[in-house]
Image (cartoon, rainbow, N blue to C red):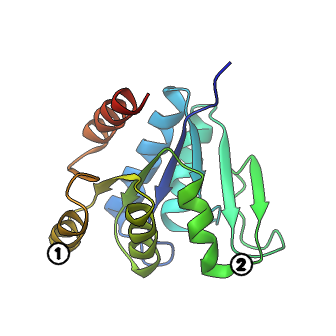
Amino acid sequence: MSRKIVIGVMGPGEHAKDIDIQNAYEIGKRIALEGWVLLTGGRNIGVMEAANQGAKAANGLTIGILPGKTEDGISEAVDIAIFTDMGNARNNINILSTDVVIACGMGAGTASEIALALKAGKKVILLSDDEESQVFFQKMSPGNVYVVCDVENAIATIHTILELRF
């Protein structure tokens, strides 16, 4: 039996836009329907909460890599909680534990996760309308950054990445 595919969904917490939350919910749901495992930052806010809720709506398995050492602020839709007591330093764990990273929206924490992913040679899908971020990250690592406009294209891109990898 082979290891389960883990898809990381990263994005803003407090400052997530409505479209980012809608996309995160739908991408979480689609990840679960594909039989993949969802990994997020595990908190009960923004993109993390939406992706976890979407995955749970489709009976998916969710992992939350949490910044603290207690259950404060954890999403009720997290099945496996990993408490790091590392604050934002947990971002590297988020990235290194995933097969593919999807960024829904953009914020400072999300940008740090994308940069860590690119440094680690991971494939990153940007599901965001932030053109400056798209240009910046594509220049940083042209072969590892994919820009998509909707959830359907994000799922298709994950399939392409996984086919090339495995």
Q: Is residue 126 left or right of residue 31?
A: left
- The span from disc 1 to disc 2 (Cα, nearest Å) is 29 Å
- Residue 3: x and y in percent read 64, 30
Asked which quadrant contains residue 75, the reply is: bottom right
**Under tag 1, what secondary structure?**
helix
Return the residue at label 1. 132
Q: In which quarter of the image is residue 130?
A: bottom left
Looking at the figure, which quarter contains the N terminus? top right
Q: Is mark 2 on a helix, strand or loop?
A: loop
- Number of numbered markers: 2
- Residue identifier under label 2: 86
Identify the image quadrant of the C terminus: top left
Q: Which residue lies furthest to the top in this view?
A: 1
Determine whether, in the image, residue 132 is placed left or right of residue 72: left
Identify which residue is drawn at 72% across, 71% down: 73
Where is residue 33 drawn, in percent x and y? 51, 27
Asked if residue 27 is positioned above or below residue 144 in the image, the reply reads above
Relative vertical location of residue 30 with respect to residue 143 in this rendering, above or below: above
At horizontal 69% and vertical 74% (from top left) the residue drawn is 67
Where is residue 14? Give x, y as percent. 50, 78
